[in-house]
Amino acid sequence: MEKILAALKDIHGVEGSFVMNTNGDLVCRQMPAIFADEIFSEVGRRLLSIYSTFDLQVSQFDDLLLKFDGYWLYIRRAAHGFLSILATETVNYPALKMASNLALSQLTGQIEHAKPIKLGPVEVVQPAAAPAPAVVAPEPKEAPKPVTTIHRRFFRGQPVD
């Protein structure tokens, strides 16, 4: 399975790919090291919810292209899982689609028998709480100054100073 995913990188613009089973569990990955294994459990959960929502609301579909700033995530549904390909926006889309067809035909029998990769829990980092502002008593207000009447001069309806 890893050889099939590695072959997808031969297409100019493909950064990496990964395969998930129908439960959203990661089965295989060929992604850059910046993507830790722990994020794939969240990706799988969201991927399943996107497909189930669209299946209920629109109709069944197999291809999903998510466009982000500078990158695309192309997801193909197979009988027993999902093939996801991360590519730059400069990728040749017809070549990407053709390569994903070939990869899916080779992966279809392997996905259902593959064991999920054990993933650790996603660690959510909470931002440090800002210290509470100190309570400061307001400054006493000065007594209002008496209002003096100022007579303005006008010439042809316009004020003149």
Image (spheres, rainbow, N blue to C red):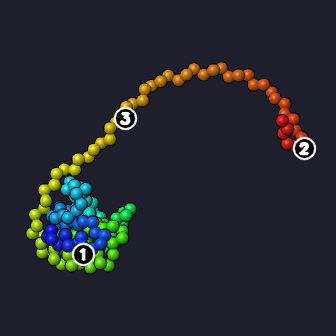
The kind of residue on which mark 1 rests is: Ser
**Residue where numbered disc 3 is placed:** 130
Q: Residue 28 in the image: x percent, y percent? A: 16, 64
The kind of residue on which mark 3 rests is: Ala
Q: Quadrant of residue 55?
A: bottom left
Q: Quadrant of residue 76?
A: bottom left
Secondary structure at badge 3 equals loop
Categorize mark 3 by other alpha carbons within 10 Å: few (<14), some (14-19), many (20+): few
**Toward the viewer: 107 or 151?**
107
Q: Nearer the viewer, mark 3 or mark 1?
A: 1
Q: Residue 5 in the image: x percent, y percent? A: 19, 70
Tell which circle, 3 or 1, labels the residue nearer the N-terminal end: 1
Secondary structure at badge 2 equals loop
Depicted 21 relative to depicted 124: above or below? below
Tell which circle, 1 or 2, labels the residue nearer the N-terminal end: 1
What residue is rendered at 16% in x and 77% in y?
106
**Residue where numbered disc 2 is placed:** 156
**Toward the viewer: 87 or 148?**
87
Q: Residue 100 in the image: x percent, y percent? A: 24, 75
- As measured in the structure, the alpha-carbon distance from the residue carrying label 2 to the one carrying label 3 is 61 Å
**Toward the viewer: 107 or 135?**
107
Categorize mark 1 by other alpha carbons within 10 Å: few (<14), some (14-19), many (20+): many
Say the numbered circle drawn on residue 100: 1
Asked if one can make out residue 60 in the rendered structure from this viewpoint, the answer is no
Categorize mark 2 by other alpha carbons within 10 Å: few (<14), some (14-19), many (20+): few
* Residue 72 placement, left or right of 99: right
Given contact means CB atoms under 8 Å apart, are the residues at marks 1 and 2 in contact?
A: no
Given contact means CB atoms under 8 Å apart, are the residues at marks 3 and 1 in contact?
A: no
What residue is rendered at 87% in x and 43% in y?
157
Question: In what quadrant of the picture does the C terminus appear?
Answer: top right
The kind of residue on which mark 2 rests is: Arg
